[in-house]
Image: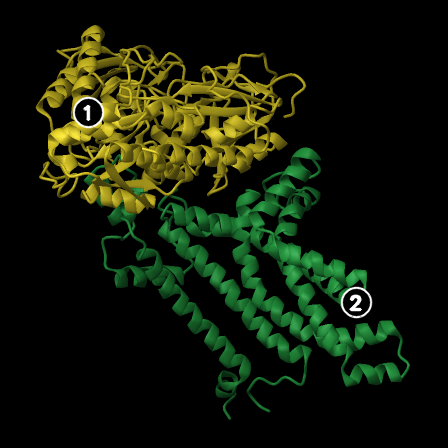
Chain colours: A green, B yellow
Amino acid sequence: MNPVVRLLTSYPGRRIGQALLTMVLVSITVFAGVRAMPGDTAQALAGEQTSPEVLSAIREEYGLDHNIAVQYWDYVRHAVTGDFGTSARSGLPVLDSILDALPITLELAALALLLAVVLGIGAGVVAAVRRGRPEEWLANAVALLGMSVPTFWLGMLLVLTFAIAVPVFAASGFVPFGEDPVENLSRLVLPAIVLGSGLAAVVMRQTRAAMLDAMSSDYVRTARAKGLSQRSVIGTHALRNSLVTVITVLGLQLGQLISGAVVTEQVFVLPGFGKLTIDAVFTRDYAMVQGVVLFTSGAYILINLLVDLLYSVIDPRIRLGGSR
Amino acid sequence: MRRLPIALAAAALLTFATGCGSLSPPGENTAAAPRLVDARPVRDGGIAVIGLKSDPDKLDPSLTGTLVARTVFTSMCEQLYDVDRHNRFVPQLAASLPKISDGGRTFTFDVRRDARFSDGAKLDAEAVKTSLERHLHLRGSGRASEIDSVQKVDTVGPYTVRLTLKHPDTPLLGRLANTAGLIMSPKAIAKYGSDFAAHPSCVGPFKYVKRVIGDRIELTKDPLYYDADKVHLDGVVYKTITDGNIRLANLRSGDVQIGDQMGPVEVRSGMGDKTLQLLNTPSLGYMAVTLNVGNAQGIDRKPGRVNTPFARDVRVREAFDLSLDRALINKIVFQDMYEPACGPVPPGTPLSTPVTCPGRDVGKAKRLLKAAGVRTPVPLELMINTTPEDNRLGQVIQAMAKDAGFDVRLRPTEFATGLTRTLAGDFQARTGGWGGQPDPAGNIDSLVGTTGSNNQGKLSDPEVDRLIEAGRSTADPAKRRDIYRKLTAAINRQHAVIYLYRNINYAVASKDISGIALSGDGLIRVKEAGYVKGGQG
């Protein structure tokens, strides 16, 4: 078979094709979605004190006087060259704002993920191993709390406690890692806790369930019968096999991590993607909304793609198509 | 009749609950006395962070349309004229008040000789001409309609500018003390054109450094500024923090030093904090219920016939007005932190005269409805914004009006949708506000004049139009004061715009910082602000 055809029909090739198609569909949906919002965009941008001349100038400048198909084609044509347009509200390039915001949300999401993985897997393992004991009860209670507490409320509580009552951390803002690593991390600790707490709880419950399942399986009984140490049985056998489930859950939850950043970034006044999105939606800044949503969707699609491709690496028994 | 106390009690409980949700015990029960300056001595150095309620739009004086952008401009773009704390016009980049001649058709003024723009260009008459002509002719300029009475801008000397007007326009001075009076560097205009917003350069105590959309605008002290000796801070950062509770939390933590446009709930909460201070000044604008009496086909069309009892009969509108208790609205909805209002001219401005608000009179309201021969309850759809405050306001109006025989249905509508519907004439009544100007014409002409571009309800009354014209073409302050007194009465006789309350502009600041000035226009000035001894910077 032709190597190109083989690549295209292989599992990775098909998954990448699906990802690209999804991106195109997302772009059409976003483009149509923001234009379906009620209210005149030019009017919203100009405000109440305006004249017909100003409205007409805004419509012309941002191409709002063309039909939606022409607007979409213009947008795609420019986007593929890296030109995501100019913010109608601020007059600054959309790409600049995205590149300013992207590292912040990614760093926040990475820290939250790290926190969720370390705490979630650790607590899940403990809860499974110490089943029926106070440790399991405690881990379950904390996980329930982590899933139930509203993000906004938890954020404000942490600010009041650790930025005002005991001023250990800053209440808001961001300092780039390259500028001051300590300040950078200290400003992201509270937001990462807020963002990661829900995910940590989910990971903990999944890990616990998967570990309980694994620990009652034949291969663990065999491992124990062979006289392997408790550490080896749990770490090498039970946990490794439980990770497939946990990674699946993490992949699915990562999207929520990014959408959860919207609230967290508002509370901690972090100029990331979430804040950029909310501000753009409220000000009807079409170009900004499209740019941000496309980047976020792209990240989400990419993560899912990587998770799918990672399956076969983690567990060689899994062969999702292609050559068997 | 019984339902009003129950509804009001519920609203009061809601207000109380909101107050309890705040960060510290509430302070005084009423609005603090106006306090516009904090004049404690300061030291040099440090950067002040100012929390803004929303992200400014384009930092281009010709294209901007938001009040919050003007707040930023107070630090980096000076105007020809400014408003002092007594709401009087004072020269800023102009060297004197204008000489008005030729029956009000010519404005002549000198500009400062010692000022430079942040990019090094010199301020002179030519620079002012360039800016004003850009305001007039740039495509999409929001200023064009504000100064459209200007026919020609001439330089009659290196530092003297003459404006020739199409018709007498006394209120023009007020607009030159607003965004239309902002002057931009001619060098930057030539270099960046309509992309000026990305590289703004003006005369001001601070100059533009950087902007991160939705986050912050960084300014640094401008050594070229003519009054640089009075500037103590090294820089200013304007940070957008939309949620009032988060802005207050940042003030308390010290991450933000000044909080702009704080709401009643946060102010009450902040008043209990010993590390914070409060500055406030009454707004020059107003908040009102606008009734649609003639907007049948759109705001840009001539007044038409709107077929509702409110549009047909002024007695129905008067009855609705009489059903409302402004003081109680202020108490329940705004915790007594604002002021009842019943006219467009803000008190405390040079042309205002005292107005006594009418009291609630349910009996008279019922009699008026009976005389008008309408079936009760009279239905009314009231469009409100989707904010908790507007929701509370709508509920209180609903409860009060019910007693007089009205059935008010609330229609919460998102801003852009509400605006589109209002301009199209697709509404019966809406709550809304006007930012306001010291000259009464700025609060009246375009809002209730038959041809006014912001006359949302399309009120058309010959007496109102006649007085508007008289106020615009009269220069004598005493005569103008009398005209606006009569004009207020004439507008109120129509009950098409029911003025309800006037905001108070509140700024909450850390006690570490001093020298902040809050002028009559409600904008925070930090030109002379700085950290007091022992403060952090």
The location of residue B216, given as percent across then percent down, is 50, 38
Q: Which three-letter amino acid code belongs to the residue tagged 1?
A: Asp
* Secondary structure beneath label 1: helix
Q: Residues within 10 Å of mark 2 (few under 14, many from 20)?
A: few
Disc 1 crowd rating (10 Å Cα; few below 14, some 14-19, many 20+) is many
Q: Say if mark 2 contacts mark 1, CB within 8 Å.
A: no
**Residue type at mark 2?**
Gly
Q: Nearer the viewer's eye, disc 2 or disc 1?
A: 2
Q: Position of residue A217 (x, y in %)?
A: 76, 82
The chain carrying label 1 is B
Q: Which residue is mark 2?
A: A132
Q: Could you tell me which chain the residue with mark 2 belongs to?
A: A
Quadrant containing the C terminus of chain B is top right
> Are labels 2 and 1 on one chain?
no
Compared with B193, A60 (above or below) is below
Quadrant of res B289: top left
Please name the residue shown 15% across and 34% down the image: B458
Pick whichever, A187 or A230, lies toward us: A230
Instruction: Kindly identify the residue that appears in the image at 27 percent across and 48 percent down.
Output: A40
In the displayed orientation, state which residue is furthest to the right.
Answer: A227
Secondary element under disc 2, as helix, strand or loop, is loop
Residue at the spot x=38%, y=32% of the render? B5
Residue A108: percent from the left, percent from the top? 61, 52
Q: Looking at the image, which is closer to me, A231 or A300?
A: A231
Is residue B217 something one can see in this rendering?
no
**Which of the numbered marks, if any, corresponds to residue B445?**
1
Instruction: Look at the picture and state if B41 lies above or below A153.
Output: above
Q: Where residue A35 sits: x, y (%)?
A: 31, 56
Query: Residue B239's mark?
Result: none
Of B329 and A54, nearer the camera is B329
